Image (spheres, rainbow, N blue to C red):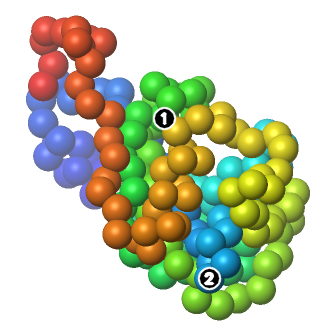
Amino acid sequence: MFGDWLASVGSGLHGYVTPKAAVGAIVGNDRREILLTKRSDSGLWFYPVGWADVGYSPSEVAVKEVLEETGIHAEPLAVVSIIDGLRHRLSAIPLYSIVFSCRAVGGELRAHPLETEGVGWFSRDALPSPLREPGRWVELAFGAIDAGGEVVCWFDPPREPMWRTGGGS
């Protein structure tokens, strides 16, 4: 079966390096607070996020990650952003990050024993420290929470000049 798949990939693509895909969730509650996790791997506070899993759609991964990491049930409302994680210093490896705006619809806060050191709801003026690269994502997150999911998806515009030019498609 693997040989069939490999043959179907096409000439010259074996071993072609592509970014991984990560899916995150900006989850808001009725008090306009954001759901954050203190990650076990870095000790930094960030929204729930995980690698895209085969067999799940991106929105299903967002719901699954929120539940696994925090115990909260979430409903996806909109895509907030699709960005290059390296460009925004959110990752040390090449990845594309798809982030959903979600609404909390139930569950009880509980930290995943292996992935998170803590979880909590935080208002804009009482964010925990240290935050993971507290740049644009905080602004986008609270914009999505305030808008109730009615957001325009943010993405990385092409740079001038492009980072890599020529050859490639």
Q: Secondary structure at mark 1?
A: loop
Q: Along the line of sight, which residue is nearer the eye, 152 or 21?
A: 152
The residue where tag 1 is placed is: 85
Q: Residues within 10 Å of mark 2 (few under 14, many from 20)?
A: few
* Quadrant of the drawing holding the C terminus: top left
Does the rendering let one see residue 34?
yes
Q: Where is residue 13? Give x, y as percent.
A: 21, 29
Dot 1 and dot 2 residues touching (CB under 8 Å) = no
- Amino acid at dot 1: Gly
The residue where tag 2 is placed is: 30
In the displayed structure, 75 sits above or below 130; it is below
In the displayed structure, 27 sits above or below 72; it is above
- Farthest residue in the bottom direction? 106
Does the rendering let one see residue 114?
no
Instruction: From the viewer's perspective, tell me whether residue 8 is left or right of residue 77.
Output: left
Q: Where is residue 162? Give x, y as percent.
A: 23, 14
* Quarter of image, res 27: bottom right
At 41% from the left and 34% from the top, the residue drawn is 84
At 40% from the left and 57% from the top, the residue drawn is 80
Q: Residues within 10 Å of mark 1 (few under 14, many from 20)?
A: many
Instruction: From the viewer's perspective, tell me whether residue 92 is left or right of residue 151.
Output: right
Q: Secondary structure at mark 2?
A: loop
Q: Where is residue 86? Give x, y as percent.
A: 49, 27
* Quarter of image, res 44: top right
- Amino acid at dot 2: Asp
Q: Along the line of sight, which residue is nearer the eye, 23 or 128?
A: 128
Q: Along the line of sight, which residue is nearer the eye, 53 or 106?
A: 106
